[in-house]
Image (cartoon, rainbow, N blue to C red):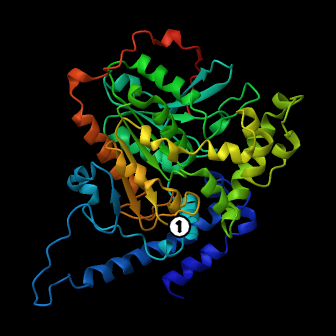
Amino acid sequence: MDNWQQINRATEEMNPIATAALTPSSFFASNRRFAPRLRSVLPAAAMSYAAVSASAPSPSSGTGEQVKAAPLPHSTLEIAGARRGLLSGFASLRAPYRAFPVLASNRHVETIFAALTRSLPAVKLRRECLRAPDDGAVALDWVSGDDRVLPNDAPVLILLPGLTGGSDDTYVRHMLMRARSKGWRVVVFNSRGCADSPVTTPKFYSASFTGDLRQVIGHILGRYPQSNVYATGWSLGANILVRYLGEETDKCPLSGAVSLCNPFNLVIADEDFHKGFNNVYDKALARALTTIFKKHALLFEGLEGEYDIPKAANARTVRDFDEGLTRVSFGFKSVDDYYSNSSSSDSIKDVCIPLLCIQADNDPIAPSRGIPRDDIKANKNCLLIVTPQGGHLGWVAGDEAPFGCPWTDPIVMEYLEHLENEKDSSTKNNTSYEGVSEASVSHLTVHGQR
């Protein structure tokens, strides 16, 4: 049996019925027994692939002369946006996008493989909980000890995980570690109920709710007034981030942002969520949502109006959960009204700070046809990179594939560093935050290590 057959055999043995009840992070933990087998066969497969690549002849003109290298960024990528020229200098984009063999042959295999086997960098975190104006709470996870070693003006990066995700997710940890290694102060914004963030009111969060993010940004700017603050979001976190940017328009206090795997158009994403193998993801996320809900079910007892608590508690799909609880909590007439009015695709035209969007053309959860390409091209502040493969939160490619960071991490970091270097020290924090201080934000701090 060759290496690829072994990989396929190991992948096939992952029970799709069992995985339907899991989020990407819990999927990794629950199927850990398959990881050693995959890890044992993939290095040999990689060596074989590398040998084939190395032995392949270089492109030539037919006369034995080498063809001039393609202009940067590489033509394997779809690039759009007025500032696309700045990407030509990025070292991370000099090579063609080359997905890891076999894994990239199927978008679901790549998505699941990344969730199952991507390494989880170890880091000690310190948790801080902020109390919201409605008495809800969100949890901020900072790298423990950074206050003692980083200068007060170190750039700050806020990370927004996807639906039900948090600081324990592998893709979040890898980005955190990369930014920290560059001298950045990094904080993970865990939405209500995520990563054991406390739930203190009968309200979670939604694709359109930006109030908690706005408070978090104000809190951080009040604490580090000499720093430029940036944000990176994945999946639903990216949708929330882009909506926030559109709402703030030219008053946005962030210095730059990155959106990855953004569903953008939630109506289109919802349509695709109920097709074929996508039902596995739908059930997995629904189970994750109901698990969080059941931990705090007593808070929702006796709610009147249009709430359908039994439907939310027993949801088999994300749509069921949103119909029973989310859309009512945030004042939408129906779940379709919620999706159509919560899509960040409508916000792109109003973004007034530098924004890089990275998508995978074969993403099963964030469909390529939902990307607002025309609006991105029309907005001088926006850039778009679309890779041919990548799945959802996968991107098993690049120097660290198949078990290391996603292919996107070096590009994201290089983009953020470019923005930070562009900022002149005399223009830092040109938006006044004199009225925002740590004391002015109602918060409850819990110190600990995770």
Q: Is residue 405 visible?
A: no
* Residue 133 placement (x, y as % from top left): 63, 18
On the image, numbered disc 1 is attached to which residue?
Answer: 110
Residue 413 visible somewhere in the drawing: yes
Classify residue 50 as left or right of residue 273: left
Residue at screen point 76% across, 36% down: 328
Q: Is residue 73 above or below residue 421?
A: below
Relative image position of residue 359 (x, y in whole percent): 45, 57
Quarter occupied by residue 250: top left
Query: At 50% across and 66% down in the image, what residue appears?
Result: 362
Q: Secondary structure under badge 1?
A: helix
Crowd tier of the residue under label 1, counting other residues whose Cα lies within 10 Å: few below 14, some 14–19, many 20 or above: many
Location of residue 106 with respect to 311 vertically, above or below: below
The quarter holding residue 268 reads: bottom right
Q: Locate residue 157, reporting x and y percent.
A: 41, 34
Examine the rendered structure and indicate whether residue 445 appears above or below residue 3: above
Query: Is the C terminus in the top left, top right, bottom left or bottom right quadrant?
Result: top right
Q: Quadrant of the N terminus?
A: bottom right
Q: Is residue 245 left or right of residue 212?
A: left
Residue found 68% across the figure and 42% down from its top: 338
- Residue type, numbered disc 1: Glu
Of 202 and 273, the residue lying toward us: 273
